[in-house]
Image: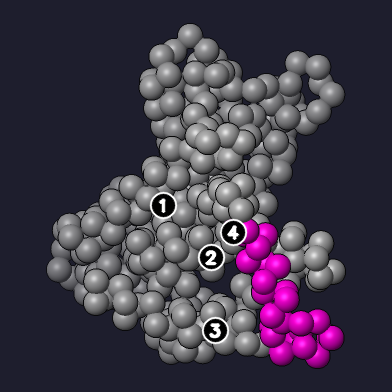
Amino acid sequence: MRRLLAAALRPAGAIGCALGVVAIALALLGASPVAVAADLADGAFGNWIAFTDTLARATPLVFCGLAVAIAFHGALWNIGADGQLIVGALAAGAIGPALGGWPHTLAIAAIIGAGGLAGAIWGGLAGWLRARRNVNEVISTIMLNFIAAQLLSWAVHGPLMEPSGAFPASRKIAAAARLQLYFPPSRVNLAMLFALALAAVCEFGLFRTAPGFELRALGRNRRASAFFGVPIARLTAGAMALSGMLAGFGGAVQISAITHRLYETISPGWGYEAIAVALVARLSPLGIVPAALLFGALDNGSQAMQRADGISPQLVYVIQALVIIALLAFDASAAGGWREAFGAGAPAEPNAGAEGGDV
């Protein structure tokens, strides 16, 4: 508990600084920072429907935030959570219509499992390229994001397009494969509890198991980990596959619980926003839950802010960017990690496959 409280201090300070800068800018533009904040909060939490919509927006951020955090703990800079979420949704949307005759529990397990498997393959491909060919995972995951987006576009305009051919969307998944909504018309569903459970499992796995220790050791010092017998290549590929699986779960539950079909714009950029979520949480899996709730509230409340005050919802992205800048300014070690990740003065590494063996 003490570790979690200590980890929360810097993010809280960074958020405070970002909000302070935004408040000054709003005042200079002639708007009331207090009124804007009140309208933003009202849009996010003002009533039961607003609150549950905020939870629904935060849920995919938890899955993607966990994906980013797991990889980042191993100094693997997974920028591809968005693509991994998309392929997870694509797999779920592809098999969903065929699950009509299945028992509900098995259909839910199948659709979520398909999404997780697709995400694991997508993330594992980047991990394999890093482990065996020393391909920078920042580049490979970004490129895979574009490929995933184009695959989704091809699918909803082609083989998975709904029968009438009028809209670029897939057929609805079978009712048996849909996660039940509770307290309608709210969008409360079991995916939210699934996200919480995964956060707890990731927290335990990272800080209470031997593989979690090896992953964190890999993130701190790759050379020393290889010296002490950590299978670098296998761990690299496995961590990226696990990261992709978590993001793929996010895509699958979005199909199963919310949209019930594939759309070309299934993700508004959750995988990229999740990088900010993970950094605000300081890569703590349990910390990702409140961080995702904060970002979900900003996303959900921005529309009410625009209606009431005439302030562009793009202000939310300004706040997110300022939070990241403030975090890096507050935390020199984080800034150093980013510099090392992008090669600014980083020492040359021997071939990862030679250190850790074949994958």
C-alpha span from label 1 to label 4: 31 Å
Work out whether 296 lies above or below 251: below
Label ID, residue 243: 1
Residue under numbered circle 3: 16
Mark whose residue sits in front, 1 or 4:
4
**Residue shown at 45%/45% (left/top)?**
192
C-alpha span from label 2 to label 4: 11 Å
Work out whether 130 lies above or below 10: above
Picture coordinates of residue 45, whole percent (x, y) = 59, 59
Picture coordinates of residue 187, whole percent (x, y) = 57, 40
Tags 4 and 3 touching, CB below 8 Å = no
Residue 96 location, quadrant: top right
Label ID, residue 307: none
Main secondary structure type of the part rendered in magenta = helix
Disc 3 packing (10 Å; few <14; some 14–19; many ≥20): some
Mark whose residue sits in front, 2 or 1:
2
Work out whether 244 lies above or below 2: above
In the rendered view, does 205 fall on the left or right side of 17? left
Instruction: Pick whichever of labels 1 and 4 is earlier in the sequence.
Output: 4
Instruction: Pick whichever of labels 2 and 1 is earlier in the sequence.
Output: 1
Residue 2 location, quadrant: bottom left
Q: Nearer the viewer, residue 50 or 100?
A: 50
Residue under numbered circle 2: 294
Mark whose residue sits in front, 4 or 3:
4
Mark whose residue sits in front, 1 or 3:
3
C-alpha span from label 3 to label 2: 13 Å
Q: Secondary structure at mark 3?
A: helix
Q: Where is the N terminus found, in terms of image quarters?
A: bottom left
Tags 1 and 3 touching, CB below 8 Å = no
Residue under numbered circle 4: 45
The magenta-colored residue range is: 22-46
**Residue shown at 35%/61% (left/top)?**
286
